[in-house]
Amino acid sequence: MITLFTHIKELIQVENSPKKMVVGKAMKQLPTIKNAYLLIEDATIIDFGEMTNLPPQKPDHCINLEGQIVLPTWCDSHTHIVFAGNRVQEFTDRIHGLTYKEIAERGGGILNSAKKLQQISEEELYQQSAQRLEEIMQLGTGAVEIKSGYGLTKEAEVKMLRVIKKLNKNYPITIKATFLAAHALPLAYKNDKKGYLNMVIQEILPAVAEENLAEFVDVFCEKGYFSVEDTELLLAAAKKYGLKPKIHVNQFHAIGGVQSGVKFKALSVDHLEEMRIKDIESLKNTQTMPVALPSCSYFLGIPYTPAREMIDAGLPLALASDYNPGSTPSGNMNFVVSTACIKMKMTPEEAINAATINGAYAMNLETSLGSICKGKKANFIVTKQIPSFEFIPYSFGNHQIESVYIEGKPI
């Protein structure tokens, strides 16, 4: 079926051939076409351009989008959407003065989520997670990475990854799965980190690989969690199974995780709230995408990733939601883009580049998603009638979406 969208006020993030990523000063450039048309066939973009250049068409459907803007769906490369219940009590604990570390030491944090997840059935976990997935699709996300890491046992980690696989099968949104058993130490291994890592490497990793449950591997490389040595041990083991690294680094402390990511050719290094000059230098001229999670900084009241310093130094940057029950209970990428502009001083052009094409790269999806390009998936957002694309981050808290198309169909 062929659908023609006409009189688009502005078509955002257009390109004639797919680019890998947008880097440094180029992130301030956002290619657009005013008074545009967009032609799709089934799930694929087949043409676009200025209305004055529209060739004769006989589409099955024709939709007039006068006064509306079209842009690619958001590509959210870092989430933990598959979880059980919530951690609202910890939210109030923080208001009363407890820190993230203190809550974790009292059995809260990741261990709290792990306990809930271990007790829930796979079907119930799927139903809760599907509801969140539908929510982010309505908010304009067309591709998402989802991590395990709230299981912390072989059975629970595999359960999480099976749920992710089932979501990917049942929904049109593109989903990438990440194995994150090294998220925290379970209580049973509280004083035996080496034993836990051995169990992850010798028992869980082979099971994940056997069922083809993940494409990426992740580690929480942070003081009090997993050291650089631990991180490299696990990444080396995962490499034998073909899992590509994506690492949690520099959230609270800079301990060398960025350098490990570069060493192991990680697809991305994520969080980066605490960045040293040498961390920025280490990322230059690499294929590793830095990923910022501004909603996490907002919710926890911690520093924001120094986007200006990183982009001005010539680095690329992606934006993701970090949707999880403890530190970011929201997958609203519209808010992420707004917060990046307001708190990280990114321009609207930079933020949109970071949340589309660079987010796609951080999931190995740059050839199929992240821009309006012939041959890419017809995943795009149709806005309400708004003055300009800058109005999207400007109007924080009020998303400007009228409809979302994923694989050519409105959802």
Image: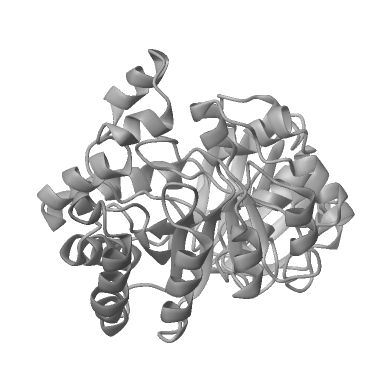
Nearest the camera: 31 or 67? 31
Residue 141, position in %: x, y? 51, 49
Residue 281, position in %: x, y? 80, 59
**Residue at position x 81%, y 55% from top?**
51
87 is higher (above) or lower (below) than 373: above
Horizontally, residue 264 falls left or right of residue 163, namely right
> Does residue 28 appear in this view?
no
Residue 194, position in %: x, y? 32, 66
**Which of the 4 image quadrants contains residue 66?**
top right
Furthest residue in direction bottom, as rendered: 240
Nearest the camera: 95 or 178? 95
Nearest the camera: 256 or 282? 256
266 is higher (above) or lower (below) than 86: below
The total of numbered circles placed on residues is 0
**Residue at position x 25%, y 51% from top?**
190
19 is higher (above) or lower (below) than 103: below
